[in-house]
Image (cartoon, grey):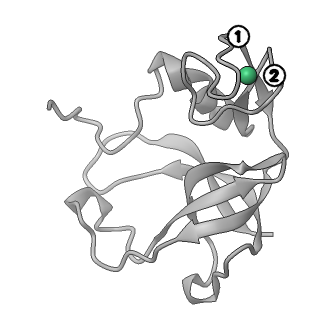
Amino acid sequence: METRREFPLPDTSWEPIREFWAGAAANELRIPRCASCGRLCWYPRERCRQCDGEGFAWEAMSGRGTLFSWVVVTHPFLPQFGDLTPFAPALVALEEDPSVRLATRMVECDLDALEFEMPVRVEFRPLIFTDVEGEVTAPLFVPA
Ligand SMILES: [Zn+2]
């Protein structure tokens, strides 16, 4: 597998998720909603996993949710993460549909004080990695 030079920055031009990153750049958390059954569909895919529909409209979420799962990383598993440790990759359940769980990161908080189902809210922050040029604005989360 070829590694992009920008790795681990996300490829914001990749069509299935381009609107997610465009939303983040505009400080909006956008998730696709199925035009047939009306359910949020995350992670984006060509057809709805509920009804097999294939039309979606991207919709701005409130940015509120609860902490579903997390880990605290103290040893960087890749050199690009060296300046980040300790950090907390997390899954956040969205208020609009808690079965939608967004892979993100908890920031600007006491990592030892994180609790299951604690209320959190989105904050848009640049992803910056050690020795990687450029940055991408991403939806990260803080305690609400
Ligand atoms: Zn559907």
Q: Is residue 118 left or right of residue 72?
A: right
- Can residue 26 be seen from the camera position used here? no
Q: Is residue 9 above or below residue 127?
A: above
Mark nearer the N terminus (2 vs 1): 2
Query: Would you identify the image quadrant in which residue 51 lies?
Result: top right
Q: Which residue is mark 2?
A: 37
Image-quarter location of ligand 1? top right
SS label for mark 1: loop
Q: Is residue 135 above or below residue 30?
A: below
Q: Nearer the viewer, residue 5 or 62?
A: 62
Q: Residues within 10 Å of mark 2 (few under 14, many from 20)?
A: few
Query: Would you identify the image quadrant in which residue 144 lies?
Result: bottom right
Asked if the residue at tag 1 contacts the one at tag 2, i.e. Cβ–Cβ closer than 8 Å, the answer is no
Q: Is residue 82 left or right of residue 121?
A: left
| Extreme-bottom residue of the structure | 112
The verdict on label 2 being within 8 Å of ligand 1 is yes
Say which residue appears at 52% left-offset and 20% top-offset.
16
Say which residue appears at 22% left-offset and 34% top-offset.
5
| Extreme-left residue of the structure | 1
Mark 2 vs mark 1: in front = 2
The residue type indicated by label 2 comes to Cys
Q: Nearer the viewer, residue 41 or 52?
A: 52
Say which residue appears at 64% left-offset and 22% top-offset.
48
The residue type indicated by label 1 comes to Gly
SS label for mark 2: loop
Q: Is residue 96 left or right of residue 23?
A: right
Q: Which residue is mark 1?
A: 55
CA distance separating discs 2 and 1: 10 Å
Measured as percent of width and height from the top left, residue 101 is found at 63, 51
| Extreme-front residue of the structure | 51
